[in-house]
């Protein structure tokens, strides 16, 4: 497969001297969602970003950020993360042959993400504090010059992430009427807005689903009290004619169940916030809507264990099995 950085080279901040660090990111499926479409009364498409190499959209930005960090001579990378940025940074750093330092809020990161970062040998620090405190520390380490920051405050991250909008326009032949996605720190909202602008096909109305609880939500990926990109993200949403939609945990989980049960798409809870946003504030009938499903369900197996039907224990006897299967 052609790495995203090669495919969109002319629209990314890359030079002939940039060593491309790739794990095969991008070119993710855009899935029609007929049953969700019928339920909500709009034409729903799912941009399935869980299909990226580490299971989230972060890989689009990380390939560019780590490639540029190498080009600029960085000897290590650092990020603060609710888990997906961590898993991605850790994997791309391993691929590049440099160490990754991860600062994560203690006790607030889903199991699968921690496993990913550990498996590839990242140095994982569990900060006894909030995501904001971890991010402040990561920025300071980067300022001291020992580590390259690969949070979305690194502009190369958003450059990579904007390519998802290019893929959507290429595949649909036009921008959709509405783009719906989860809103945590706001970097991805901003990246899509830039991407659609650069694709030259017009910017869809952006419906950004945020957790009403922000600092306390079941959607751990977006457990962020103070979005680092709030100003640009909310400006982009307003300019698009869209809205920030504030979601209760039950609304996010209802969308999570529908994505899985109606369409077979198993994502982590935060990733259902785009679908939840259109279920709560439905666009006009028949509108074409792309919902970005940002991360894979295997990231957060404990959520599935808590929220979905438990397995049934049965004796290894055909009669008992047939009865239980009915
Ligand atoms: N969906 C998932 C699965 C995420 O991991 C994140 C952010 C978002 C949505 C929100 O994107 O911050 O650009 O608005 N995760 C970050 C992390 C904070 O550390 O992995 P955003």
Image (cartoon, rainbow, N blue to C red):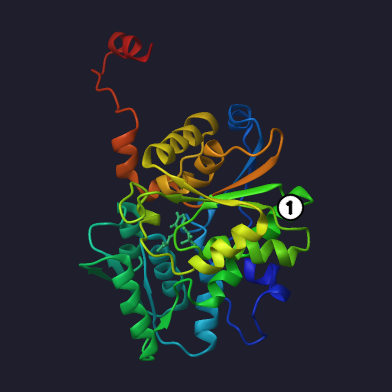
Where residue 321 appears, as percent x and y from the top left, is 31, 14
228 to the left or right of 242: left
Q: Is residue 254 above or below residue 72?
A: above
Q: Is residue 24 above or below residue 97?
A: above
Query: Residue visible at 30% across and 8% down?
Result: 319
Q: Circle 1 — which element? A: loop
Where residue 259 appears, as percent x and y from the top left, is 50, 36
Q: Crowding at label 1, few (<14), some or many (≥20) Cα neighbours within 10 Å?
A: many
Q: Quadrant of ligand 1?
A: bottom left
Q: Residue furthest left?
A: 128
Where residue 77 appears, as percent x and y from the top left, is 40, 79
- Viewport quadrant of the N terminus: bottom right
Compare residues 92 and 167 and report the one nearer the observer: 167
Label 1 within 8 A of ligand 1 by Cβ: no
- Viewport quadrant of the C terminus: top left
Compare residues 90 and 107 and report the one nearer the observer: 107
Where residue 103 appears, as percent x and y from the top left, is 30, 71
Compare residues 217 and 165 and report the one nearer the observer: 217
Q: Which image quarter: residue 129?
A: bottom left
Q: Which residue is mark 1?
A: 175
Can residue 320 be seen by looking at this rendering? yes
Query: Residue visible at 30% across and 27% down?
Result: 311
């Amino acid at each position: 497969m052609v790495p995203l950085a090669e495919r969109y080279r002319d629209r990314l901040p890359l030079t002939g001297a940039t060593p491309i660090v790739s794990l095969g990111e991008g070119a993710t499926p855009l899935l029609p969602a007929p049953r969700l479409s019928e339920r909500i009364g709009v034409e729903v498409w799912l941009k399935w970003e869980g299909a990226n190499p580490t299971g989230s959209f972060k890989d689009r930005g990380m390939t560019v950020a780590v490639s540029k960090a190498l080009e600029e001579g960085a000897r290590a990378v650092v990020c603060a993360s609710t888990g997906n940025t961590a898993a991605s940074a850790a994997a791309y750093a391993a691929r590049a042959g440099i160490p990754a330092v991860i600062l994560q809020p203690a006790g607030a990161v889903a199991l699968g993400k921690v496993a990913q970062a550990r498996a590839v040998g990242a140095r994982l620090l569990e900060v006894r504090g909030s995501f904001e405190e971890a991010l402040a520390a990561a920025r300071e380490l980067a300022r001291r010059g020992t580590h390259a920051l690969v949070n979305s405050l690194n502009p190369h991250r958003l450059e990579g992430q904007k390519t998802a909008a290019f893929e959507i326009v290429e595949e649909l032949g036009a921008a959709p009427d509405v783009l719906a996605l989860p809103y945590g720190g706001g970097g991805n909202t901003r990246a899509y807005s830039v991407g659609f602008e650069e694709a030259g096909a017009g910017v869809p109305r952006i419906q950004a689903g945020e957790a009403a609880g922000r600092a306390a939500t079941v959607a751990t990926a977006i457990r962020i009290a103070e979005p680092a990109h709030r100003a640009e993200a909310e400006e982009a949403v307003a300019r698009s004619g869209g809205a920030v939609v504030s979601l209760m945990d039950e609304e996010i989980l209802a969308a999570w169940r529908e994505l899985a049960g109606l369409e077979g798409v198993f994502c982590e809870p935060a990733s259902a916030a785009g679908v939840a946003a259109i279920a709560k504030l439905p666009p006009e009938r028949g509108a074409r809507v792309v919902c970005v499903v940002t991360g894979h369900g295997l990231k957060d197996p404990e959520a599935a264990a808590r929220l979905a039907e438990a397995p049934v224990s049965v004796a290894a006897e055909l009669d008992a099995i047939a009865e239980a299967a009915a």
